[in-house]
Image: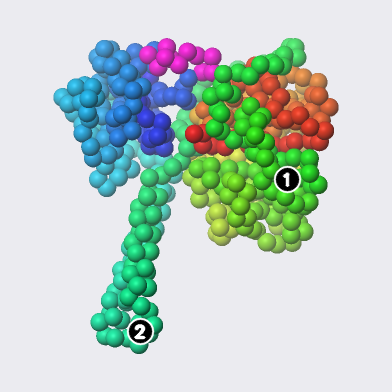
Amino acid sequence: MDHDVFVSYSTKDKAVADAVVASLEKNGIRCWYAPRDIKPSDDWGKAISSAIENSHVFLLIFSDHSNRSQHVLDELNVAISQELTILPFRIENLEPDGAMRLHLSSRHWMDAYDPSWEKYIEELINTVSSSLDFTISREEIEIPRYLNRKQTTQNIKKAAWILGALIITGFLLTAVWYGNPWTEAFSQDDQKDALTQTAERAVAIEKTEEFREEATQSFLETKTAIEQPTPSVTQSPTETETQETESTQVAAYARCKIAFFSNREEGQNIWIMEPDGSNQSQLTFNQYDDNFISWAPDGEQVVFRSYRDGDAEIYIMNADGTNIRQLTDNEISDRAPVWSPLGDEIAFFSNRSGAYQVYIMAIDGSNLQQLTTVHGMYEEPAWPFLDWSPDGERITFTSDRDGDMEIFVMQADGSEIRKLTSNDGLDAAPDWSPDGKEIAFSSDRFGDEEIFVMNPFGENIRQLTSNKGISGNPDWSPDGSRIVFVSDRDGDFEVWIMDADGRNQTQLTINDVPEYIPKWSPVCE
């Protein structure tokens, strides 16, 4: 299938690439970029070459990283040989060198670095559409909500810190000039330290504007962008053969982490391991059940539920298990927290209204908002689940409002609630794929609970596992090529991993106690 734009970038600029692709696709411009559009079984080089040949515009996100990237240069060479329109989107103020200079010196550049690349998204959309022989007026251009929110938040923070720095600096200078007695105890060294810390804080705020958001991917919001669904469910006819050998995809993820909770010590505690099951280490140590883990988009922190204060509350900590802080504090049950792709909100279930409803709050526990009202889970949920779409626009959740547990989706503000599954049994544990095109979930519609996938409209349902016992709690790898899950096929619940198409199922944990709800770190080094 032809694509309008091939997006070439250094992996170190992936956050920019994600935002650019989301913006272009929101305005009807079809993009191809790796690793999202490479299937697990594809040869990487052939997939790249074929995608370039079947595109019309070669969009190069140019930075110091891409300037020194051999694979970006290789992609550029193919694009030139195919006589594609080359559009360099320069996000840093620097000139190309070496072979890159030879190829780009005569090209028209789009400078997008002053003050930052986010300011030039509209212009980029307009430029690309013009290259494709159709024009989108500025009035028609749509910018993804998370980009608008990000820019507004950054401007507010930046203004606040600058104003604070000016007030502090002005106060100190005035005090020193007029000999304020309070400053006599405030030495010159102390004043220098204060000014230095203020300047360093301002620099830190500037650096946060670089927007590290690995989990944010493009989401095709129109039904025509998704493969036409079939009304039937594709069911695996035989038991999937478990593979004893480690796949090459697992080896490639040597620096990734998978978090899960285990009963191997007294009470449930949070553990972490590599995707091949090695280097298992314990992060929390208590007897009050720590579980339901969700990673921050940058992989630096996790949020989880714990009974350590007597009832189910939500906590946050660093990814190494340090600096544990409590976010909710009440006499009711808060559970199943999930970090938003933008990183500024946490969605969770709570029965503070009498039934289990969906709420969101800021990551410091403030700004609590109830999203669902009439509809919720009216019985104590054993396994409540929520998940954000990769672009942060939608939330999937489980509910028994129709008599049994089904999967629903709504806008992130709680509006437009729609039912995705309709089944007499259990449908639960929805988890969005990184590209937003599929949702993995568990269901017992054919007997044992197994793992399925469907598109975001509840259609084109396919079964991935078919084994004796239960398989559930699916979670996609950051590039969408693998799914980690739990299964009790060997007697007790353990963590397993498989390809996104259900092949190469491999057991990761082997214990005499159950392990549950594995969650893949969104950032892989």
Where residue 69 sits, quadrant-wise, is top left
The answer to whether any part of residue 419 appears in the image is no
Residue 97 in the figure: left or right of residue 338: left
Circle 2 SS class: helix
Residues drawn in magenta? 39-49
At a point 42% along the width and 12% down the height, the residue shown is: 46
Task: Decide: is 356 above or below 130.
Answer: below
**Nearer-N-terminus badge (1/2):** 2
Q: Is residue 343 left or right of residue 474?
A: left
Q: Tell me, yes or no, whether the highlighted magenta stretch contains residue 44.
A: yes
Secondary structure type for disc 1: strand
Q: Are marks 1 and 2 in contact (CB under 8 Å)?
A: no
Q: Amino acid at mark 2?
A: Glu
Label 1: how many residues lie within 10 Å, few (<14), some (14-19) or many (20+)? many
Residue for badge 1: 269
Q: Is residue 52 visible?
A: yes
- Residue ID for mark 2: 184
Q: Residue at x 37, y 50 (%)?
A: 207
What is the tally of numbered marks visible in this picture? 2
Mark 2 neighbour class, 10 Å CA radius: few under 14, some 14 to 19, many 20 or more? few
Q: CA distance from mark 1 to mark 2?
A: 53 Å
| Image-based side of 174 in relation to 343, left or right | left
